[in-house]
Amino acid sequence: MDDAALRERHGAAREAGGEARALPLGPSAMDALLVSGEAEPPGEVIEPGRALALADFAPPSLGAGERLIRLAYRLGVPGATLAAPLRRPAKQRLLATVASPIAGERAAGTALRAGHFLVHGARIPIAGVDFAGAGRLTPPAERMVHGFAWLADLEACAPREACTAVADRILGAWLDANPHSSAKLGKGPAWAVANVGQRLLAWLVHAPLILSHHDKAQRARILTAIAAHARWLDRHVGKAEDLLGEVAGWCAIVAAGLLLPDGRPRRLYGEAGLIRALGELVGDDGGVLSRSPLGQIEAVTLLVRLRACYQAVRREPPAALGAILALLVPPLLALMHGDGALGSWQGGWAYEAERLAVLIAASGVRTRPLRDVRQWGYQRVVAGKGVLQLDAAPPPLARHARTGCASTLAFELSAGAQRIVVNCGGAAAAGGLIPVRLEQGLRATAAHSTLVLDDANSTAVLMNGRLGPGVGEVEIDRRTMTADAANGGSGSGATRLEASHDGYAARYGLLHRRILVFRDDGSELRGEDLLVPARGRAKRGKVPFAIRFHIGPGIELGRSADGQGVGLALPDGGYWQFRAGSGDGPGAEVTIEESLWADGQGRPQAIQQIVLQGLVSRGGGSFAWLLKKMG
């Protein structure tokens, strides 16, 4: 369908004034709006950097006796000996019942009762799962099965007495496949530190669900497994795959120290290790080093569940844990769109608004989103009902990335509850309904709304979620502008973001610079993508480029008659227009292509993308474009 036909059938387009028209976007208009203006306040250039500044938190202040206990426990002296050296070890039991602070997903719990694990829309028969780990599951399924995240889902779907048989059957099968005395203990995905930590914490928080039957032998077996997991983590927590996995391990150690008898030495040991690990995981502005909203959610979830363990035994957690939790929430809110769900960044997806709201409420943190998350790297601009998000930092370091993406200078745009420009997202959900073979493609630069040079990633995308060389520095300038009608504006102000990265400098000798100007009423986003020679004399020849705009779900697209514009008919009746403008580079072709978007549950949805593509000289070029609400 072409743009004129789309406008004709769209009510908002008729109200806007009839047939499609080309919007002016020449160099003079861009210069006036984007570059000139002595009255503008000077921009503040954020220093480039590749690593976040680490948050520094000290462990709780202890007396000499407690420090000695903590040191002795770290050196291997049994907790029972340190807690009560003159009596026999206490009987295995739990000291308190924890009130689960975060409800699971009802649909996933219902699927469990029907005999399936539900993983991002994919149903995995419980009877067909190899709990021993010889038959490998996909990464999301491994986290679900071996991390026992399904316990919260099961508890959320029905009264406890209706779910205990299902929990007992799955847990029994898992314990049969992973006996704590086995020589294989510590091998395979079940014994990744992150999975062990999540599993032990889930067992402790949801203990009433797995310990409520009357079989004393089975109860003793589960309690023995809980104690064995805690001892295993004491010895292996430092061997975690990444910092977030280490934090999960430390949280479980502290929870075991709170809820198991003679646990004081373990608690003291765990609190010191946890606060140190969190200090290494979290930057000064509260963002985790992986730059992943999923990692941010996991960190908040772990601390909320651990706090519930403290509340169960009526003990105040260390003040540092509350301070870190208060740091973690505002950056997460910075990636929230007008619909209350998250943007799709670093392997994540449009994480559901309802689930996010439950998590934030459980955290107890009342705060506003950070507008300028400098170290975490995401810029947020709110204009009217519109929200603009920009990735203005290098990708995470390889050792921190689980599903690292080459997304530098990509953006997302929403108007109210409607997403207009998105990233594909969903790499971390590959293995559900999203096929595993798409995981690397969803991490590529082309899966994000930014410029791609020669179909190459701005940062190398490697196997197993890792990243290679590429973007090393990002410069970002943000300023507030005023624009009058004489400069082509509407009389309202705007926020201007200018950022550049060096991801293509080594291979093609070009820097990518992106300028975005978002009007204060949220009705217009003007952009310009520039390729600038990195150093010295420009090289000869040309290289293909593509500027991709992945368009949100439910939006119908139609090309304009002149081939330089696209109409966007929104499901809510709104109408936007995309126009490619003139610049210093050669003319570019505007096309519409198929794309994919991961929805709030990590399931794939078919969408479309607008692609501005052509050849650019190695001497550089610029390409202006406009997204404008009509009517």
Image (cartoon, rainbow, N blue to C red):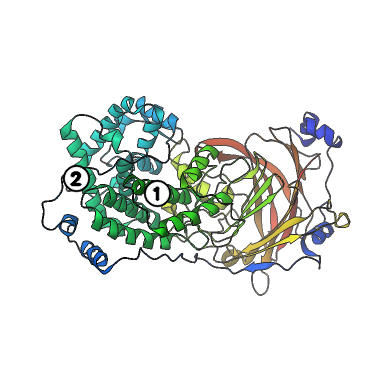
Question: Which residue has dot 2 on it?
Answer: 180
Residue occupying the point 72% across, 59% down: 496
In-front residue for pair 254/293 = 254
Mark 2–mark 1 Cα distance, whole angstroms, equals 24 Å
The image quarter in which residue 318 lies: bottom left
Residue occupying the point 56% across, 51% down: 367
288 on left or right of 502: left
x and y percentages locating residue 233 in the rendered image: 26, 53
Question: Which residue has dot 1 on it?
Answer: 302
357 on left or right of 497: left
The amino acid beneath tag 1 is: Leu
Q: Is there any visible trace of residue 627 in the rendered image?
A: no
226 on left or right of 327: left
Q: What element carries label 1?
A: helix
x and y percentages locating residue 603 in the rendered image: 50, 36
In-front residue for pair 94/287 = 94
x and y percentages locating residue 114 in the rendered image: 36, 24
The amino acid beneath tag 2 is: His
